[in-house]
Amino acid sequence: MALLAVVLGFPRIMSYDHSLQQQGSQLRWSLLLCLGLTFWMGFRPISSAFGDTVNYAMAYSLMDPRQISMDWHGEWIWQWVMNGSKAAGLSIHAFFTIIAAGYVLSAAWAVYRFMPNDPLLGTVFLLNSLMFFPFGVNGLRNGLACHLVLLGASFLLDDKWVTGSLVCLIAVGFHRSAFLPIAALLVGIFLIRNVRYIIVFWFGTILVSLLAGDVFAGLFAGVGFDERMTQYVTISDLSEFSQSGFRWDFLLYSAMPVAMAWYVCVKKGLQDNWYNVICTVYCLCNAFWILVIRSAFSNRFAYLSWFLYPIVIAYPLVNMPIQEDQDRLTGWILLGYAAFSVFMWFVFW
């Protein structure tokens, strides 16, 4: 993906020719890229190198297809898909391919809806995100749920309330943590659209977390919308988590979309309804992560905002007049975006 970012980035730096942008061709390449990645992820080896892949494979192999049950108080759609796949006699790789298809294609569809003028560029930003691959092969449920929320948001912002609401409900059926970005989305649509205020709030949560982060972690653990969250924020022995504590590296990574939002909406004074809402959702969800940043597996909370990362960065580059010679700026940002993800992966992970 980083190589593809270079291929697309350098032509833009060298005075990109808009006549080369053919939407049909871009859509075909984007779809081909996403389908290839879907099958590659679906047929990955059952190895601990891919995080929870081994655990999901073990649970799938031990499942009795004659005892199909749905827990309506939990993530019942996930259970329905998993149990139904086993009852149909599908292999573990076929099951993983189905999940990967939902994960990759729902996000690609959302990218197209947000950036129809340049879907290939949006797709490359999406696939170069730091957490895109890990949450496609490790955090399967919350990754899929977040991408469904992204797709649902594109429908809600387009005033397609029935479709958007249905997609968001399906997201919750895959992982209850989707409640957080959905709630932030409703706040962005109905209550707060001034990006300046939400950025100030985001900075405020950093100070609060530094001074009283443990208090808020305990408070959120008691809310109980997801028992896994309670487990993560109440672990007392963090010796096995070498990357626990206040993650300044992740905070720096999280600050990039905030900086883009400030530059576009505050410094440049550009206003776009879709972009304002997405920036609000990102800042609110990321602020939640900042408050529980010291918890084990805090990257799982971070993904509740990070799934919006490529949209916050790429949307204004495609849809808004930021500055003259914008193609050159887009090329440099794309290259820097990919390089920073590679740097974070190999140096800090």
Image (tube, rainbow, N blue to C red):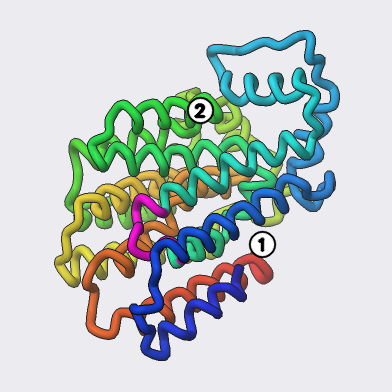
Q: Quick one: 29 or 135, which is closer to the camera?
A: 29
Q: Is residue 250 visible?
A: no
Q: Is 23 placed left or right of 158 in the picture? A: right
- Of the residues shown, which amino acid type is indicated by label 2? Arg
- Of the residues shown, which amino acid type is indicated by label 1? Trp
The earlier-in-sequence mark between 2 and 1 is 2
Task: State the separation of the CA atoms marked 2 and 1.
Answer: 26 Å
Q: Quick one: 111 or 194, which is closer to the camera?
A: 111
User: Which portion, as a residue range, is magenta?
Assistant: 112-120
Q: Residue at x 49, y 60 (%)?
A: 123
Q: Is 299 placed left or right of 111 in the picture? A: right
Q: Secondary structure at mark 2?
A: helix
For mark 1, what is the residue? Answer: 349
Q: Residue at x 60, y 72 (%)?
A: 2
Q: Quick one: 89 or 265, which is closer to the camera?
A: 89
Q: Residue at x 37, y 34 (%)?
A: 182
Q: Quadrant of residue 345?
A: bottom right
For mark 2, what is the residue? Answer: 176
On-image quarter of the C terminus: bottom right
Instruction: Indicate whether 111 appears above or below 345.
Output: above
Q: In the rendered structure, does residue 39 fall within the stretch colored magenta?
A: no
Instruction: Indicate whether 183 appears above or below 18.
Output: above
Image coords of residue 317 (percent x, y): 32, 69
Image coords of residue 113 (percent x, y): 36, 50
Q: Residue at x 77, y 47 (%)?
A: 43
How many callouts does the rendering have? Answer: 2
